[in-house]
Image (cartoon, rainbow, N blue to C red):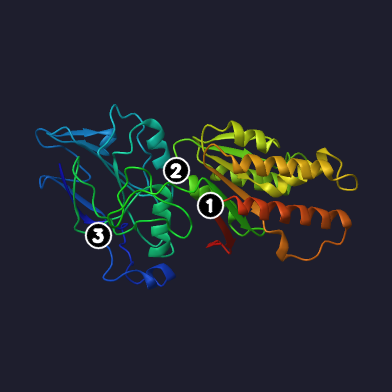
Amino acid sequence: MRLLLTGTAGAGGWPEPGCPCASCATADRPGRRPFGLVVDDVVAFPWAAAPRGYEVLAGGLGLAGPDGRRVLCVPADREAPLDAAVPYDVVLIDLLDRPERLGALRRSGAVTGETQVVAVGLDHRVRSAAELRRRLRLWGAVTVPDGTVLHAGGPPPKATALTTGRPPDGTARHPGQPGGVEGEAVPPARRALILGGSRSGKSAEAELRLAAEPYVTYVATGPSAEGDAEWAARVRAHRARRPAHWDTEETTDLAGAIRAATAPLLVDGLGTWLAAVFDEHGAWDGDRTPVDERCDELVSAWRRAPGRVVAVSDEAGMGVVPATASGRAFRDALGRLNERLAAESEDVTLVVAGRPLPL
């Protein structure tokens, strides 16, 4: 099956003519044309009807060719079909709004390590080409230039979006995904610590890291929202943003959760966990030795993490000095914990104004 991508952008192209946004202003020229796909020079997407020997699949999103090869196109406004009997050879998917659809496809078995995953529908929803490259590394996908010919079941394309080796943020493609130049796949960072101030975008960045994974356990450490309308609104926002296929575990036994993990973990966050530990041991104005012991236990489990784990924490050293002794004790404990976990992490990132800065 021969796939000709006549365009790889969203409906308005990228840059979009007349758009003054920063993404369009800095986009590569001459730019990308709106998405278009022609299969074997005989049928174009969307395929209302298939020629003889071809079969339309997945409610009009998939196509099987005479050679048995299969391609799936998932535009931004369509749900990913999760009922494939066998994996697809090529998946062309808009990832900019809902990358978790790729995770759901992987979970269902429709996408495997042998599937070529190519991002299309590219436009100014991403702030720059550099940010697009970073996200595709996180999600195990590639992008290719307009006019690229792909062969389902053939060798993968030499993508323009990836490079070989470990990028500065410690991320990399999934096994089986091609790189921009020849080279071995590099596994993603096993331990990632995402730091940031209040409303910095640190939680969204952490979620982005795991958005395209088939299985994720979200470890919520915050207190219940009972009687606190503002906190309840924050909890609802976090829940709405998380992919529906993720599991959730509410616990303050972080060390136990890490040791027992069988899927990637997202811990959000260490500040609320430490506050809960202070509460559990009455340590705000009492003996803080139990808090130190719990931190030691967490660092030990983090060091020996059996699988991938991403943790969110507040950067405690950039605010005002707390007015109370208990507040200063908490700030110092969180700062020490961050430092110790950072020393045991392959990837440490500080998020400022929504921008990730690798440390």
Q: Is residue 68 left or right of residue 86?
A: left
Q: Quadrant of residue 74?
A: top left
Q: Are the residues flagged by discs 1 and 3 in contact, CB closer than 8 Å?
A: no
The residue to which callout 3 is attached is 145
Q: Is residue 290 left or right of residue 126?
A: right
Which of 289/2 is in front?
A: 289
Q: Position of residue 201 (x, y in %)?
A: 58, 57
Q: Write the residue at 68% across / 35% down.
A: 251
The residue to which callout 1 is attached is 346
Disc 1 residue type (three-letter): Glu
Disc 3 residue type (three-letter): Pro
Element class at badge 1? loop
N-term-proximal mark, 1 vs 3:
3
Q: Quadrant of the N terminus?
A: top left
69 over 202 or under it: above or below:
above
Disc 2 residue type (three-letter): Glu
Residue 96 seen in render: no
Q: In the image, which is nearer the foreground, mark 1 or mark 3?
A: 1
Q: In the image, which is nearer the foreground, mark 2 or mark 1?
A: 1
